[in-house]
Amino acid sequence: MFKTNYHSHSSFCDGKSSMEEILLAAIDRGFTHWGVSSHAPVPFENKFAIKPERVQEYLLEFKRLKDIYSDRIHLYLGMEIDFITDMMENIREQSKDYGLDYFIGSVHQVKEHNDSLDSWFIDGHDPDIYDRELKELFDNDIRRACEAFFTQQIRMLEINTPDVLGHCDKITMHNKGRYFTNETPWYEEMVRELIDIVKKNDTIVEVNTRGLYKKRHTDFYPSVKWLEILKEKNIKITISTDCHKADETDLFYQEALDTIKTIGFTHLSYFEGEWKEQRID
Ligand SMILES: [Zn+2]
Ligand SMILES: [Zn+2]
C-alpha cells in the first residue's frame, strides 16, 4: 500500500521546519507519495501564509528538492488555499497561476457575504480569538456563524471545487462542545448538507489528524460520525497529517487508517499525476 500525505506545511508559511527537513522525515517514515501545501498568500496582513514575494522561491525550492529526491519518493507541488467569501474566491485560477499539481481548499476565515472586510478566525491556538470574534462579528449567534462557515464551504465547492476539501468541520475545534455538539440538530443538518454538495461535486475529503496530536480536538476532522456518512455515500477520502514540522509528518496516520478501515472504507485516494484510488487491506 502506498503511504501518502498531501497536506504539509514548512517554514515558507507557518511551519517550523524547512521543506527539506519535512521531506527527509517523510522519506524516513516510509511515505511513498508526498505533497507540499503551504498556505497560499491571502490579501491581508497575517502570520500564517506565504508572503506573495516568496512564492517564486517556494516553487524553486520544491523543484530543487524534487530533482534531488524523486528517486526515493513521489513529490507533488500543492498549496492549501483559503476560500474567503467575496475576498478570495478564484482559488482554482490561483492554483493554475502557480502551476500547482493539486490544491487543498480550506476555510480558516469565516466571512458572510457583506460589505465588511472582517472575518472570523476559527483556527490557530487561541480560543479567545474564536470567542471574541464570534461576539464581535456574529453577536454570539453561533448558529448564524456556523451557517456562514458551511455556506462558505458550499460556495467554494460549487464555484471552484478544490482537489481536496481541508478539515471540513474545523469549526468544532475551539467550540469544545460549548456552543453546539455533533448531536445538535441544526448543526447536524448543516454538515449533512455540506456532505451532499461534496458528493455532487465528487470532491475528495481529507481525514485530518492534526487536532489529535496537537491535543486541540478529540477526533479527526471530520469527526468519525461524519466519516460514517461519507462512507455510506461512497465519498472519496485521503489521509492528511497537516504537519508543520518534521516530527509531525506521520502522527496519527496509522490511527486514521485503522479508523477508516473499521468504518468500512476499502479505498483511499492518492495523487500520481492525477487522482486515483488504491485498495487498503
Ligand atoms: Zn488548514
Ligand atoms: Zn494545513
Image (cartoon, grey):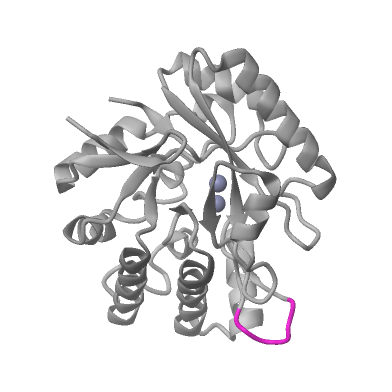
Q: From the viewer's perspective, is residue 167 above or below residue 148?
A: above
Q: From the viewer's perspective, is residue 262 above or below residue 89?
A: above
The residue under the point 27% across, 60% down is 226
The answer to whether residue 209 is left or right of residue 148 is left
The image shows residue 275 at horizontal and vertical percentages of: 39, 42
Locate residue 227: give its quadrant: bottom left
User: Magenta span covers which residues?
Assistant: 112-117
Quadrant location of the C terminus? top left
The residue under the point 55% across, 41% down is 101
Q: From the viewer's perspective, is residue 90 above or below residue 231?
A: below
Is 158 magenta? The answer is: no
The image shows residue 49 at horizontal and vertical percentages of: 71, 49
Tell which residue pokes out farthest to the right in this image.
53
Identify the main secondary structure in magenta: loop
The image shows residue 231 at horizontal and vertical percentages of: 20, 55
The answer to whether residue 55 is left or right of residue 92 is right
Do we see residue 137 in this rendering?
yes
The residue under the point 30% across, 68% down is 182
Quadrant location of the N terminus? top left
